[in-house]
């Protein structure tokens, strides 16, 4: 018997099963077997789920059960359904044999005068045994992310994929032993990436990236910023909220307020890139001049933060004020390691007057962004080591807002296939993610994106 059948039976998704509570008759509000009346709303829900997906990536409808409530001129359908997603066929995302992924979905559909409207959609892999965020726990998921032994018949295939990775990213290893070690890390990472993929509730694809031969510990040590969760941050004045509602979508890249994607290299200086990106946008909005500003100045001259070992945006704003401003990238170029401070007041091109902390309400953040410019934020970087494209939405226990470790820049927001997202400028170069950008689910506090939002103030 398939491992998920007991769960389907428990939830009333198999013939003969009922989810009516003990002692209550299965009346008008009980879950009913699939009927012709439920198939129309179920097919509409499936169409909405598949919107924007390529033909070969569309899910198929499995078992359906539901109930209906009559409401005035229409009907409200509450459905539970299984969806079968086809196996991944992207060779850069899925190297290991994966059977179809079965999702358990809850849909609420309103039918008024023959027109359907999707009110709610919650889907998760059935093997997680999760139907509600409030019930999620670390113990539910961590076993799924542990390294498993690779089947022997895949060793030749994985060796070929690793060779392609080495060629694509121009890797060189000093010894045969090191190459063998890196291949074992790579293989374990591919297993981990596919498990992250199975647990993601967005549209993100995870797989081979330029970080695929690094252990998780190496990646965190080199590229992330533990001080964001460890160091108490400097209190900043709370910004005044924007009274106007946020437009449906916004993107400062289209309006000239965002410089090209940069690369922090093997240095945990994301905090500096997040802050300079914000200041670049603030200066552009006030002065009409987009300048690429110096992160190296902050790495070298901000004596409160710890250069490549991490830092806090709040400290960086103070350092800019204390120094008297920022030089441009051209005048103080990025090296990716700590050196003696070489700041020159005569070369300052940009100054700031203050810095502010922003609301943790994502609707207010969106309104502030559209009105005031790109926002410095910090996030939990779970899964980003293997992120390739799409909208990421990791399960909350895996991407806790209390473990933020990477500073980035919100540059816009919108919707793809009815899924709301934040457009995030990262600092890992254009050969990562979507040409250097990361897309994260908006409206759910995903990965703590709303916890540490801030901006410089330029008068």
Image (tube, helix red, strand yellow):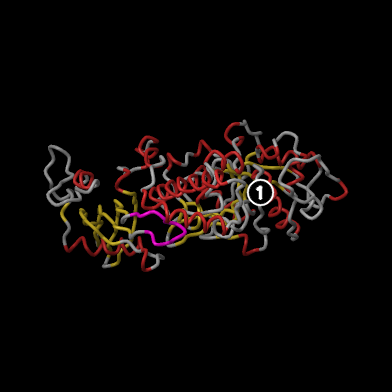
**Spot occupied by residue 163 in the image (x, y as percentages of width and height):** 52, 56
Q: In the rendered picture of this protein, how many numbered marks are placed on residues?
A: 1
Q: Main secondary structure of the magenta part?
A: loop
The single residue placed furthest to the right in the displayed view is 346
Question: Considering depth in this image, is 207 or 61 the residue closer to the camera?
Answer: 207
Is residue 459 shown to the viewer in this render?
Answer: no
Residue under circle 1? 265
Helix, strand or loop at label 1? It is: loop
The residue shown at (38%, 42%) is 148
77 to the left or right of 297: left
Rendered view: 380 above or below 197:
above
- Magenta stretch: give its range: 88-98
**Spot occupied by residue 126 in the image (x, y as percentages of width and height):** 29, 48
385 to the left or right of 121: right
The single residue placed furthest to the front in the displayed view is 176
Quadrant in which residue 395 is drawn: top left
Q: Does the magenta stretch include residue 76?
A: no
333 to the left or right of 359: right
The residue shown at (31%, 52%) is 103
Rendered view: 173 above or below 248:
above
**Spot occupied by residue 377 in the image (x, y as percentages of width and height):** 59, 45
């Amino acid at each position: 018997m398939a491992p998920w059948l007991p769960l389907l039976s428990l939830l009333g998704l198999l013939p003969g099963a009922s989810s009516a509570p003990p002692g209550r008759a299965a009346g008008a509000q009980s879950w009913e077997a699939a009927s012709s009346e439920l198939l129309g709303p179920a097919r509409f829900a499936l169409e909405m789920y598949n919107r924007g997906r390529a033909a070969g990536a569309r899910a198929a409808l499995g078992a359906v059960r539901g109930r209906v409530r009559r409401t005035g001129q229409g009907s409200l359908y509450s459905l539970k359904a299984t969806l079968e997603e086809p196996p991944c066929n992207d060779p850069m995302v899925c190297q290991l044999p994966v059977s179809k992924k079965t999702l358990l979905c809850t849909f609420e559909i309103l039918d008024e005068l023959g027109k359907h409207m999707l009110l709610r959609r919650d889907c998760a892999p059935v093997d997680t045994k999760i139907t509600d965020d409030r019930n999620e726990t670390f113990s539910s998921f961590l076993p799924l992310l542990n390294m498993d032994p690779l089947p022997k018949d895949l060793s030749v295939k994985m060796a070929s994929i690793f060779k392609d990775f080495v060629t694509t990213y121009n890797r060189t290893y000093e010894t045969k032993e090191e190459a063998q070690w890196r291949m074992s890390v790579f293989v374990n990472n591919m297993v981990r990436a596919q498990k992250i993929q199975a647990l993601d509730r967005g549209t993100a694809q995870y797989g081979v990236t330029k970080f695929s031969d690094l252990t998780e510990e190496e990646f965190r040590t080199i590229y992330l910023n533990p001080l964001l969760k460890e160091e108490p941050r400097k209190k900043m004045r709370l910004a005044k909220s924007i009274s106007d509602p946020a437009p449906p979508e916004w993107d400062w890249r289209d309006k000239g307020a965002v410089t090209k994607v940069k690369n922090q290299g093997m240095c945990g200086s994301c905090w500096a890139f997040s802050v300079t990106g914000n200041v670049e946008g603030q200066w552009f909005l006030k002065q009409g001049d987009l300048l690429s500003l110096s992160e190296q100045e902050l790495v070298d001259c901000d004596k409160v933060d710890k250069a490549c070992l991490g830092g806090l945006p709040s400290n960086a704003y103070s350092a800019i004020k204390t120094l008297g401003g920022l030089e441009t990238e051209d005048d103080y170029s990025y090296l990716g390691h700590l050196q003696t401070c070489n700041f020159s007041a005569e070369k300052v091109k940009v100054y700031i007057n203050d810095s502010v902390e922003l609301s943790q309400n994502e609707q207010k953040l969106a309104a502030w962004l559209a009105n005031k410019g790109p926002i410095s934020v910090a996030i939990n970087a779970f899964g980003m080591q293997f992120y390739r494209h799409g909208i990421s939405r990791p399960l909350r226990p895996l991407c806790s807002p209390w473990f933020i470790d990477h500073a980035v820049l919100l540059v816009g927001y919108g919707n793809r296939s009815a899924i709301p997202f934040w457009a995030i400028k990262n600092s890992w170069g254009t050969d990562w993610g979507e040409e250097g950008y990361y897309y994260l689910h908006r409206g759910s506090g995903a990965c703590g994106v709303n916890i540490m939002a801030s901006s410089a103030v330029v008068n």
